Image (cartoon, grey):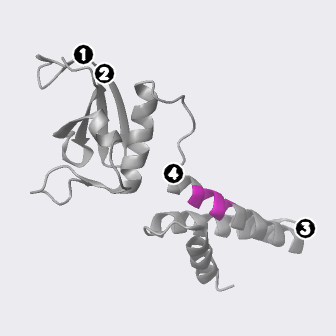
Amino acid sequence: MSTFTHGRWTVCIIKAGEMYGASNSLVNDTNSPFIEFYDNNHDKQFVQRYLLETLLQRKSRAGLMLQGGVPEWTVSADELDIILDWAKVEVGLVAAAPIATPANETIKVIQDVLVKHAKSTLQADPIGYFAFQGALEHTTSGSRLLTTIGEDTSESAIQLKILAEYEW
């Protein structure tokens, strides 16, 4: 059994012939792997199980409601893309490759802006004291931005937030 944690979800792949269930008393006797979802916000509570091939056949890039009676048990389209990319690698449908996430893109944009403005600060103060303080302030603000950026992680939205933060 392979497991992967992404955000609030821990997912498990149960391949054909593998044991699963609360006491490992069941056997996957299908020719297709299962994918199970566990909620990390509720002590890894089991939420739902699907045949992996069912999820791979989705026609649109939509999220997945795991249980209709619990709205918070919905996997967003972005989360599902990342989870299914991992699952495809685990079952050998595709070769392993780095998984891009919106957070990686956000970090790169913020790093680029911080480097640019830290260089400006260093050039203005070659002796170093104010350069160090400026770089520290840029880093602190960048970290604060990472925690406050909402769902829109497009480069232009991030740049606008950064510009607004620094009033440039």
Q: Indicate the quadrant where residue 134 lies.
A: bottom right
Which one is nearer the viewer's eye here, 52 or 127?
A: 52
Q: Quadrant of the C terminus?
A: bottom right
Name the front one of labels 4 and 3: 4
10 Å crowding of disc 2: few (<14), some (14-19), many (20+)? few
Q: Earlier in the sequence, mark 4 or mark 3?
A: 4
- Distance of mark 2 from mark 1, alpha carbons? 7 Å
Q: Nearer the viewer, mark 2 or mark 1?
A: 1
Q: Residue 42 or 132: which is nearer the viewer? A: 42
Residue 107 located within the stretch drawn in magenta: yes
Q: Label 1, label 3: how many angstroms apart (C-alpha)?
A: 63 Å
Q: Earlier in the sequence, mark 1 or mark 3?
A: 1
Which residue matches tag 4? 101
Q: At which x and y percent is residue 17?
A: 24, 13
From which residue to which does the magenta span run?
105-111
How far apart, in angstroms, are the residues tagged by discs 2 and 3? Answer: 56 Å
* Res 1 label: 2
Q: Are marks 2 and 1 in contact (CB under 8 Å)?
A: yes
- Of the two numbered discs 1 and 4 on the same chain, state the one appearing first in sequence: 1
Inter-mark Cα distance, 1 to 4: 30 Å
Disc 2 and disc 4 in contact, CB within 8 angstroms: no
